[in-house]
Image (spheres, coloured by chain):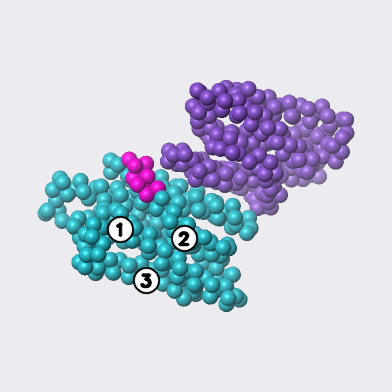
Chain colours: A purple, B cyan
Amino acid sequence: MTAVTTSSMLAVDRSDELTLLGLVGQLELVAFTRLAEDSALAPNLDQTLRLARFSAGAVARLERIFARITELGGSPQTEVARFAHVMDDFDARTPSSNWWERLLKAYVGYGVADDFCKAAAAGLDDATSSLVNEVLDGTSHADLVVAELAAAGADDPVLRARLALWGRRLVGEALGVVQCLVQGQPGLARLVSGGAGEPDGPLAQAASAAEDDAAAPAAAHLFGQLTAEHTHRMARLSLSS
Amino acid sequence: MTAVTTSSMLAVDRSDELTLLGLVGQLELVAFTRLAEDSALAPNLDQTLRLARFSAGAVARLERIFARITELGGSPQTEVARFAHVMDDFDARTPSSNWWERLLKAYVGYGVADDFCKAAAAGLDDATSSLVNEVLDGTSHADLVVAELAAAGADDPVLRARLALWGRRLVGEALGVVQCLVQGQPGLARLVSGGAGEPDGPLAQAASAAEDDAAAPAAAHLFGQLTAEHTHRMARLSLSS
């Protein structure tokens, strides 16, 4: 890649990198709000406090993303604002009807979004890509969800069956979010289709021509990856995906 | 006080101190949740982010209170749980109908509760009383509220008049919360009626005999103090109390 670097390509890369950081920042902001709501709704004080800490942790991770955006010469607010409503559709389409469904929704929904960001970060420079991975792995919220759902489902096959079904619905909707992101943000499409070195990679083409056959293998690869991670996540809960 | 210290009095003092720390902890937890909701409802990204930071800050302050409770041999969760619904009635009685009313509600409601805690902390040992004061002064949320309400009201005398009226309603309800606290928690009554050295002070008696004339001067002093602080707070907004 260094051999073909030109100033114009560098500019494209930098702006794609900022776009991804904006998405990660927005996801942390959404996580902060959602975890604070979870904290207020939690069935006992112990979970209230743990979720409050996770929520505050999301703000701390947001600050690290903001610092990196500033370091790269971008405006944190501009980059984050680009994704202001990124999870709104997902939320509206998947109203959870109880505490367990709510926990699973955050675990699956954020899980898919986080995996997408990690895939997009893979092609970036080490500093940004390590930061994105650290930030997205920085919550132990998943451990709480796994422990709570495992305990609740242990003697309740009906609950387990319902949650397995709920998980399948959630992952479908979450993959829909990813599809919108790839189609609506060419910068993200470029990143996931092979890193910053391929500004015209197949998924970038998919952004402007979603039906294009050339985009199919890259898209299939990405969605295959995200689905595999989801299966792994559901297996941790002993739920079939 | 040292001259009359006995092991039984020490036990009473320590438990009153823990009770107050529990209240401060619960207020920080309530502030965390409320500021996170404010953040989600804020009219622009700048305020969303500032409120998210204040919310996370409340969790950091909660941790300091928890550390002190543990240091004193108490259980943070037990002390906080004692005040689980402390602001519920206040919230239910004062539904805010717009963003400005919501901002003012937090400013006035928390303001009164914070002042009450500071008054109760005055009689405690330096370590706890400085901590309580630091924690309660630790948010610059008030600055945001003052700036926003001043800007909104600058050219809008109708809004200013409505907010002044709203402030009067809020302080009445907030003083009601304080009254319930003093009546329901003898430890707090002892603290505000003259510090840990006066376990049978007049406000402590008020806890068991609210109508007792002997309690009246101490209660009047406390409520006078809280009202004066409220007047000062409203003056910062150029609103009449």
> Residue A218 magenta-drawn?
no
- Tags 1 and 3 in contact by the CB under 8 Å rule? no
Q: Specify the quadrant of the image occupied by residue B149.
A: bottom right
Task: State the CA–CA distance, disc 3 to disc 2.
Answer: 23 Å
The quarter of the displayed image where residue A35 is located? top right
Q: Amino acid at mark 2?
A: Arg
Residue type marked 1? Val
> Please, which chain is the residue tagged with disc 3 on?
B
Identify the residue shown where x is 33% and y is 56%: B181
Question: What's drawn in magenta, residue-wise?
Answer: B75-84
Q: Mark 1 or mark 3: which comes first in sequence?
A: 1
Disc 2/disc 1 C-alpha distance (Å): 20 Å
Q: Foreground: A113 or A156?
A: A156
Residue identified by numbered label 2: B93
User: Hey, which quadrant is residue B121 in on the image?
Assistant: bottom left
Residue type, numbered disc 3: Ala
- Residue linked to disc 3: B228
Q: Name the residue rendered at 52%, 70% in the picture.
A: B163
Which residue is at 55% across, 52% downward? B37
Q: Which residue is mark 1?
A: B182
The correct choice, above or below, for A136 with respect to B109 in the image is above
Please report whichever mark, 3 or 2, sits nearer to the chain's N-terminal start.
2
The residue nearer to you, when weighing B61 against B176, is: B176
Direction from residue A94 to residue B167 in the image, left or right = left
Q: Could you tell which of marks 2 and 1 lies nearer the N-terminus? A: 2
For the residue carrying disc 1, how many other residues have a C-alpha within 10 Å: few (<14), some (14-19), or many (20+)?
many
Name the element at disc 2: helix
Q: Is residue B140 visible?
A: no
Secondary structure beneath label 1: helix
Comparing B238 with A59, the one in front is B238
| Chain identifier of the residue bearing label 1 in the image | B
Residue B226 locus on image (x, y percent): 35, 67
